[in-house]
Image (cartoon, rainbow, N blue to C red):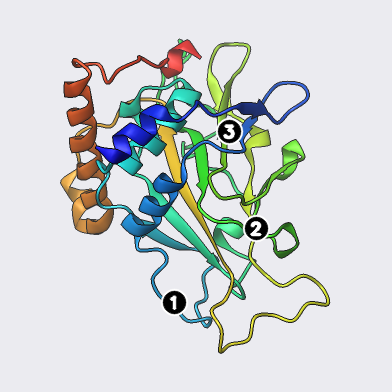
Amino acid sequence: MLAAGLAAASPPPLWTALSADRPVAWHAERCVDDWVVERLLELSNATLPTHPRTYTGAARLHLIDDQGDPAARAARRVLTQRAALPPRNAEPLFVLEYVEGHRCGLGQAMPHFDWNCADGSTSAHDDGAEACPQLRLVTSLVYLNDVPDEWGGGTRLPRAGLRASARRGACLLWFNARRDRRGRLVKEEKAQHQGECVRAPPGVPATPASSPPRRKFVLVQWIRASTHEDVDESVCEEDPGSCIALRALQEALADEEGRAGGDGGRRGRTADEL
């Protein structure tokens, strides 16, 4: 009840468009409260002792099993409302951990797209019928700790000329697709992005091996162009952790919709209405 009361008392975040012409991304200096940040870190177990510095990846993924926790609900609500899409379109929340000294030349630390359709358009037919219901239309982030700019830790959209700093409680959101002149959802080239590694600036010694390294924690919320279908059992066999998180999310959303009278509260736009 305390968490619910705090969430209700919080003012809505002030979002700012980060583009001079056609907005590509939006940023809010403060979109969630401290209790949400602390609880999300706890749910993800991300702040437990870090993996060795010999780890060869760029970022470590921490799934959140309890997608119905009040903090998960609060973060999902803020992000889906700003995207103006239904909560039913949300994928499970997870946390990415970047650790000082880890490799920067691969994965999330390299410029990439979250576009997950077969080609550059979601329409496979002349009549414009959508052929990519799994499209991750929106990528949204919540930064869970502060990282000084000189140490990196921010997020860049290089083709859009944008950068957001890692500031606790701040949010960043962008669309991975846009409508072309024919009304089709097509790949947004300006949505190329990369997560900055955490590393010592020039002339500054790295953190000694005997001390905990600097880290960056960021919550990721992908929002699809359409609602999720039922969980595919083959997915559960290949990736049990993701399957658990997805089922927990579906149960949480069903519960939210029941409390709101069957429609999940305020109705967002569908992809066809963008």
Asked if residue 135 shows in the view, the reply is no
The residue drawn where x is 20% and y is 43% is 247
User: In which quarter of the view is residue 13 placed?
Assistant: top right
Residue type at mark 1 is His
Q: Is residue 230 above or below residue 97?
A: above
User: In which quarter of the view is residue 227 placed?
Assistant: top left
Q: Which mark is residue 196?
A: 2
> Label 1 vs label 3: CA separation?
30 Å
> Label 2 vs label 3: CA separation?
17 Å
The residue drawn where x is 36% and y is 22% is 86
Q: Earlier in the sequence, mark 1 or mark 3?
A: 1
From the viewer's side, name the closer residue of 68 and 192: 68
From the viewer's side, name the closer residue of 171 and 245: 171
Crowd band around label 3 with a 10 angstrom C-alpha radius: few (<14), some (14–19), many (20+): many
Residue type at mark 2 is Glu
Q: Secondary structure at mark 1?
A: loop
Residue 254 percent across, percent down from the top left: 18, 29
Q: Which residue is mark 1?
A: 51
Q: Earlier in the sequence, mark 2 or mark 3?
A: 3
Residue type at mark 3 is Trp
Crowd band around label 2 with a 10 angstrom C-alpha radius: few (<14), some (14–19), many (20+): many
Q: Which mark is residue 174?
A: 3
Task: State yes or no: discs 1 and 3 in contact (Cβ < 8 Å).
Answer: no
The residue drawn where x is 51% and y is 44% is 142
The residue drawn where x is 24% and y is 37% is 1
